[in-house]
Amino acid sequence: MATTPTSSTPPKRKATRHRGEGQWAAGHFTPLNANEQFKKDDDSLNVRTRIETIYAHRGFDSIDPSDLRGRMRWWGLYTQRRQGIDGGKTAILEPHELDDEFFMLRVRIDGGRLTVAQLRAIGEVSQTYARGTADLTDRQNIQFHWIRIEDMPEIWRILEGVGLSTTEACGDCPRVILGSPVAGIAANEIIDGTPALEEIHRRVVGNPEFSNLPRKFKSAISGSPLLDVVHEINDVAFVGVEHPEHGPGFDLWVGGGLSTNPRLGERLGAWVPLDEVPDVFVGVLSIFRDYGYRRLRTRARLKFLMADWGAEKFRQVLEDEYLHRALVDGPAPAEPVGRWRDHVGVHRQKDGKFYVGFAPSVGRVDGSLLTKVADLAAVHGSDRLRTTTEQKMIVLDVAEDQVDSLVAGLESLGLQVKPSSFRRGTMACTGIEFCKLAIVETKERGRTLIEELEARLPEFDEPLTININGCPNACARIQVGDIGLKGQLVVDENGEQVEGYQVHLGGALGLDAGFGRKVRGLKVTKDGLADYIERVLRGYLADRHEGERFAQ
Ligand code: SF4
């Protein structure tokens, strides 16, 4: 018989390790933190109406704080860092003291797919409303800075007029769906995931059923044997494989993510045919919404649920509660066919035309340059361009007799089709120029580092990735770079605190994926960065064995 607890005998509860994680599926609908509260108070998608009808007319000061630092992200808007605040103040100041009255605006570009008209529209917005800024991100998006709230209605009119959108480009919702930039055209493609990507987009983006997730949800789909969408670090990913009985389809990966608690995604051992990918995507997304942890922001990504459940249980719940059928067992992807995943260079398409990938430095371009790229593509008979997950771009559908002229045109704009390993393999996040969480500068440092290394080591031509972050977050994927540089303040030889980096070495993606080793105690100042990397690479060149790669 059950006993009634008294004040001196607390009620006995079943001891579960994760009691009170705020999972909706366990009936925890009471918000357990401020983020959950504002998401419950009003669907974040509704902020669009307030921007158009109130804030754009009354200005920055009229914006409700829970919209300003919360819901606006669902439409791609973040406040940018107030200019002139050094990295030492980042952790000390209150959020409102770091806020500028200007915004970063992210345009989601699912699959990295752009037409000439869309790229021209991005160029127009950049030049008219964003002081020329337009950075390529490592998730195939484009980001503007210096955006005023007053201009948002007109910016949306221009972007949406050509089929672009900022819907759920940020926020706790389904973010941009990464896709192979050469889907449907690459001669060596296993399967084209484009129809699934389009159907997923139609079903989930802007859908209130999925606009309140525990945190962001990152996804990817690619049928390229280059494994070109960083599938290992997405919440859900579909990777092209050939099933011995059923033919081409996708291998399902779940629970990857970087940030300060990195975790590689795991295979569920399931093969998914193209037409079932949207159902499986929605199933995984729904598990995240229903079972994802909502108590602490730091434990709210899907990877934490996956770490507790494991792949076997995750697949069981997916099959039993969401798909109501068993998935087919399937093979793992094969070793990638190349070390570079970025599609830079000139490559033949399956239809006999060519695609041409080029390398802006650390994704830094601008509106005027993008407009010129759009014009160049059009002049050379192309209406399709792509962004990549390495902050690079590609022009598709170029006739053979147009290739040389296009390459020359791009190179005259400083966009190299045959870049050095340093230009090709270096990425940098936004950094202190605009990011409120940043401690150090990244973009300009990345650009000068590339030039330094090109001058010092012109003979170095191996695949190499150098990933530069402005803080301990992982927006430029430091943990999976050959050389990862995590921005922090360090002490120089004069005992002064200066900008610098904690070094991580030996991270990798692919079948031998793993996180870089933090080199204990190894921190370099900003001024010592090129010297340090030169020393590491020269040491490697002097000691390497036959067939050895830097990343090994
Ligand atoms: Fe900002 Fe840090 Fe992300 Fe860089 S890694 S964009 S500094 S949050």
Image (cartoon, rainbow, N blue to C red):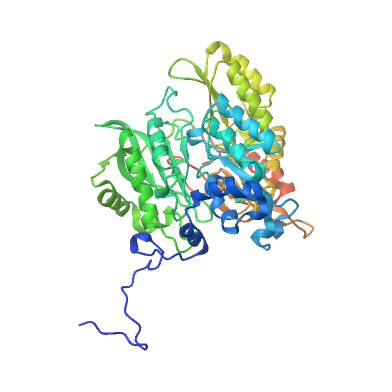
x, y percent for residue 104? 63, 45
Closer to the camera in the image, 41 or 393: 41
Instruction: Judge whether residue 460 can be spotted in this image.
Output: no
Compared across the picture, whether 133 is left or right of 192 comes to: right
Residue projecting furthest to the left: 1
List x then y, in percent, for residue 308. Answer: 37, 59
380 over 18 or under it: above or below: above
In this rendering, position of residue 5 left or right of residue 340:
left
- Residue at 57% across, 34% down: 159
Q: Using residue 388 as the reference point, say whether residue 239 is left or right of it.
A: left
Q: Is residue 92 above or below residue 111?
A: below
Q: Does residue 163 appear in this view? A: yes
Rendered residue at 60%/49% (across/down): 54
Between residues 361 and 3, which one lies in front from this camera angle?
A: 3
Instruction: Please state if 519 lies on the left or on the right of 445 as rendered.
Output: left
Location of the N terminus by quadrant is bottom left
Quarter holding residue 523: bottom right
Residue sitting nearer the eye, 235 or 160? 160
Name the image quarter holding residue 422.
top right
Residue 102 place in picture, x, y as percent: 68, 47
